[in-house]
Amino acid sequence: MMHPLRFLCTLLAGCLLLLSACSKKEDPAPGGISGTVTPAAAIATVTATGPSGTKATTAVSATGTYQFTGLAAGSYVLSFAPAATYIAPAQVTAVVAAGATTQVPAVAVQQTSGSLSGTIAPADAVTRVTVFEATTHFTATATVTSTGAFSFPSLPPGTYYVDFNATYLGGMTTFEFLAYYPPSQLGNVVVVSGQNTALPVVTAVPTRANKLSTPKWRITGYLLDVAGANGAVDVYAQMPACERDNFYRFNIPNQYIKDEGATKCSVSDPQTVAGTWAFDANQSNIDLTVPGTASTRSVLYSLTATTLQLGTSGTTATGAAYTAYITYTAF
């Protein structure tokens, strides 16, 4: 028979073990948070701030997903660290339950910038394109490529003016030596965040100086109208072959050259004679000066890429007024 004191001790020990087992509870299972951002490259990291102020940070995968594990139950605030050129989206609240993963809605991230692109025709008409935002006064400049393309890959959203800097020849900066008229400035060009604004093809028109200087010219028509005579005379029909093959150059900035061509009417004639040419202020008349002769002014009736028509007035040796109409063809 067990001694009464020993029995009491054994009973007390069993009660203590039972109380200890009853008071011990299992810790709740941790939870988690998962989500997605688009585009994937827009967000570098996501941070979850818990109810006690504790923080956990995770990276965004190449597919735009992110996940937190081992979180205690409670309410968390998610904040997003944006990559360059993207705007940080609004914070997201996620409630974590023990042993469960909370899936939060996908977050779409906007870019801080848009883009602008276009094409110049012909490609060499413009060297630079400049954009100017009217409200913020933001400005940027792009160089036109050899194919005429230009682009601004990163522009703050806004409404822009687009200016075109025409090509200059020979370092000249006066208007008559512009290779091309600058195309008209474009206004109200809207750049939207995350989108590209594609402009229509911008066409530049060559100036008269450029049209005049680009080709070689050969006379293909010559009419002489003398006052009092019975109609105009076709001088070209009477010109010998040694004169018909002559050609003329109007070089930038102001060099005029007459070349005798393949044949000379006199072997003693120089192959070329050089002088100067210049437009008047309105580019409607051409002044020609050749050493040893008087300067002449010709009216510019027509100038295209292939045809030049000039008119020259004067007085014959007998005092009769005349006008000569000369047509040149480019080759």
Image (cartoon, rainbow, N blue to C red):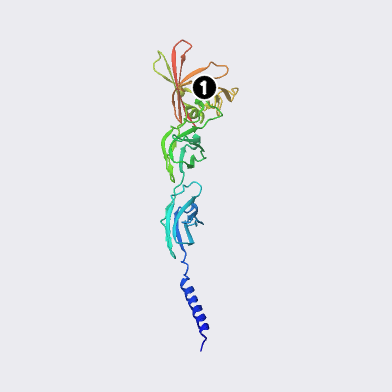
Task: Report the label total.
Answer: 1
Q: Name above or below for residue 280 compared with residue 86.
A: above
- Residue drawn at the location 52% of the way across and 82% of the way down: 5
- Residue drawn at the location 47% of the way across and 74% of the way down: 19
Can you tell which quarter of the image residue 193 is in? top left
- Residue drawn at the location 43% of the way across and 53% of the way down: 92
Percent from the top left, x then y, of residue 189?
42, 37
- Residue drawn at the location 47% of the way across and 52% of the way down: 79
Can you tell which quarter of the image residue 299 is in? top left
Q: Quick one: 326 or 210, which is closer to the camera? A: 210
Image side of residue 310 versus residue 256, left or right? left
The amino acid sitting under disc 1 is Ala
How packed mark 1 is, by other alpha carbons closer than 10 Å (few <14, some 14-19, many 20 or more), is: many
Q: Name above or below for residue 313 compared with residue 99.
A: above
Q: Name above or below for residue 284 compared with residue 71.
A: above
Seen from this angle, which residue lies furthest left? 230
Seen from this angle, which residue lies furthest bottom? 1
Percent from the top left, x then y, of residue 246?
53, 26
Percent from the top left, x then y, of residue 137?
47, 34
Percent from the top left, x then y, of residue 140?
50, 37
Q: Quick one: 6 or 118, which is closer to the camera? A: 6
What residue did someone put label 1 on? 278
Q: Quick one: 58 or 49, which is closer to the camera? A: 49
Q: Quick one: 48 or 52, which is closer to the camera? A: 52
Secondary structure at badge 1 equals strand
Seen from this angle, which residue lies furthest top? 319
